[in-house]
Image (cartoon, rainbow, N blue to C red):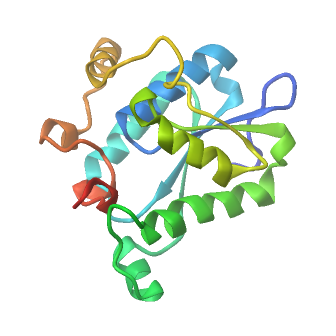
Amino acid sequence: MITEIPRDEHGIAHIVMFSGGLGSFAAAKRIVDKHGPAAVLLLFANTLIEDEDLYRFMREGAEYLGAQLLILKEGRDPWQVFFDVKFLGNPRIDPCSKVLKRQFLREWLKERCEASAAVIYLGIDWTEEHRFVAAQKYWMPWVVEAPLCSPPLVLKDDILHMLKAAGIASPRLYEMGFPHNNCGGFCIKAGQ
């Protein structure tokens, strides 16, 4: 467990919500390239039903980027959250992500980092800009950026080539045809 959030020379923490997906890796690379690895924290909220290869990918990605990786867990899995809130999540309403990721990480950050001294980065790309607008509202008063919504715009294949050049194998869920690397392939937001 880290004792202090890394910061740049101006005292700003650069916190990448590191999901284990291609987008968050590419976003993290842009932030590390811009601010240096010592100023970046890769923050992951474990849902406890992740594919085992996700952890390999995150470790290798963090090592390649040179940034600190912190894996946190709320303690329940999505099925326990559905039971506790008495609602089965679906592509439109995601109590699992809300509880296990957004609310949990927001509380963690609130206890450790003033909003004026941090920037939160998301792996949302230019094809999902509507998600970025909603995320900005949710994370207020923190500043939120989505580096992949700005040029140079990249496609999934571009990120896969970046990984290959770095000697990092793509997460196996992508190789199996899944469009994401969340919740062991069972992410309700992806219609599963």
Q: Quadrant of the C terminus?
A: bottom left
Question: At 84% across and 22% down in the image, what residue appears?
Answer: 9
In the image, taking residue 100 as reference, residue 120 lies left or right, namely: right
Relative height, residue 18 to residue 149 (above, below): below
* Residue 98, percent from left and from top: 52, 65
Question: At 79% across and 54% down in the image, what residue appears?
Answer: 112
Question: At 32% across and 46% down in the image, what residue appears?
Answer: 54
Nearer to us in this view, 36 or 143: 143
In the image, taking residue 84 as reference, residue 50 lies left or right, namely: left
* Residue 101, percent from left and from top: 52, 60
In the image, taking residue 133 as reference, residue 51 lies left or right, namely: left
Nearer to us in this view, 192 or 37: 192
* Residue 103, percent from left and from top: 61, 64
* Residue 151, percent from left and from top: 51, 13
Nearer to us in this view, 128 or 152: 128
Number of marks: 0
- From where the camera sits, is residue 47 visible? yes
Q: Residue furthest left?
A: 176
Q: Quadrant of residue 16?
A: top right
- From where the camera sits, is residue 1 visible? no
Nearer to us in this view, 19 or 98: 98
Relative height, residue 134 to residue 189 (above, below): above
Q: Quadrant of residue 38?
A: top right
Question: At 50% across and 27% down in the image, what residue appears?
Answer: 27
In the image, taking residue 175 as reference, residue 104 lies left or right, namely: right
